[in-house]
Image: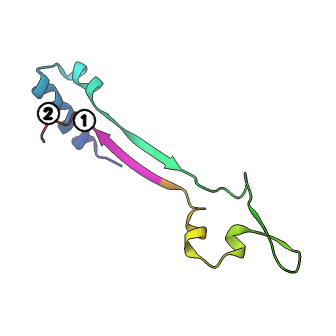
Amino acid sequence: PISKSMVEKVKRAVGKSRQLLQREARYLFSHGTVTNEAYVAERQGIAIKMKDGRLLDIAQASDLPSIKAISKIVKKNYLCWPKNVSL
């Protein structure tokens, strides 16, 4: 996660650049966490029919690491502020 000190640093820089109070500056930047679940087998299985007629989940049927990787939850943190504000 992004540290509170970094968030405060951005808030101060945004406020200073626009001559705003701290409580007003908070409207000009954003921070948080986003997640992406590209493939969740429990909710939406993709079944592959094998030559022998068996149905296998795509993550089990594939030997490609990229297929197994899409079943993992990806979590990213972000911190956005106006482009013209330098830290």
| Residue 72 position in % (x across, y down) | 56, 61
Please state the total of marks drawn on the protein image. 2
Distance between the alpha carbons at the discs numbered 1 and 2:
9 Å
Residue 63: x and y in percent read: 63, 79
Please report whichever mark, 1 or 2, sits nearer to the chain's N-terminal start.
2
Q: Amino acid at mark 1?
A: Trp
Q: Which residue is mark 1?
A: 81
Q: What residue is at 72 percent from the left and 75 percent from the top?
A: 61
Q: Quadrant of the C terminus?
A: top left
Which residue: 22% across, 43% down? 6
User: Foreground: 51 or 9?
Assistant: 51
Q: Is residue 6 above or below residue 59?
A: above
Q: Around disc 2, counting alpha carbons within 10 Å, would you say few (fewer than 14), some (14 to 19), or many (20 or more)?
A: some
Mark identifier at residue 13: 2
Q: Which mark is residue 59?
A: none
Describe residue 70's horizontal placement relative to residue 11 as left or right. right
x, y (%) of residue 23?
24, 20
Magenta stretch, residue numbers: 75-81
* Left or right relative to 60: residue 18: left
Q: In terms of image quadrants, where is residue 65?
A: bottom right
In the picture, measured across the screen, residue 37 lies left or right of residue 3, that is right
Residue at 25%, 35% (x, y): give it: 81
Which residue is rendered at x = 73% and y = 55% of the image? 42
Displayed quadrant of residue 64: bottom right
Prevailing secondary structure class for the magenta stretch in the rendered image: strand
